[in-house]
Image: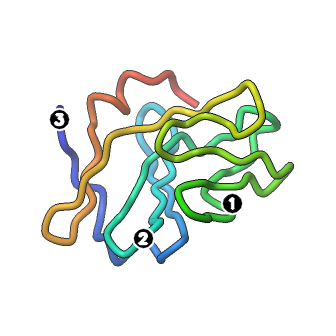
Amino acid sequence: MSWIDIGALDDVPLRGARLVKTRAGCVAVFRTGAAEVFAASNTCPHKGGPLSEGIVHGTRVTCPLHNWVFDLETGAAVGEDARIDVFPVRIEAGRILIDGAAVGQRSAA
């Protein structure tokens, strides 16, 4: 894995998200707990809604356009036959690191 520092943990509000722009498209970083973060594609496959603007609850996010719910651990849509890309992340010394190789493997969004 090729870990890339994408910012401070405190830059992402609890039960909120921030957008990270990459060459392969935008990645949403979600903070679901004091020291728990997830990274996923920002675009809902249903109608293209910006997931970083959705409601974070537990380890899920609800799309702000049409209320589809995605599991941030697996990327699977709840009750739908769809999914979003998810990417490995970790926290080190208060910084969020994302696996740059995994992000680079996805197609541009």
Kindly report the distance in space between the C-alpha atoms of the residues bearing marks 2 and 1: 16 Å
Question: Quick one: quadrant of the N terminus?
Answer: top left
Q: Position of residue 54 (x, y in %)?
A: 69, 60
Q: Position of residue 53 (x, y in %)?
A: 67, 61
- Residue at the limit of the structure toward the right, as seen here: 66
Q: Nearer the viewer, mark 2 or mark 1?
A: 2
Amino acid at circle 2: Gly
How many labels were placed on the picture? 3
Of mark 2 and mark 1, the one earlier in the sequence is 2
Amino acid at circle 1: Gly
**Residue at x-position 68% and y-position 64%:** 55
Q: Position of residue 66 (x, y in %)?
A: 86, 49
**Residue at x-position 65% and y-position 41%:** 43
Of mark 1 and mark 3, the one earlier in the sequence is 3
Instruction: Name the residue that disc number 1 marks.
Output: 54
Q: Position of residue 73 (x, y in %)?
A: 47, 44
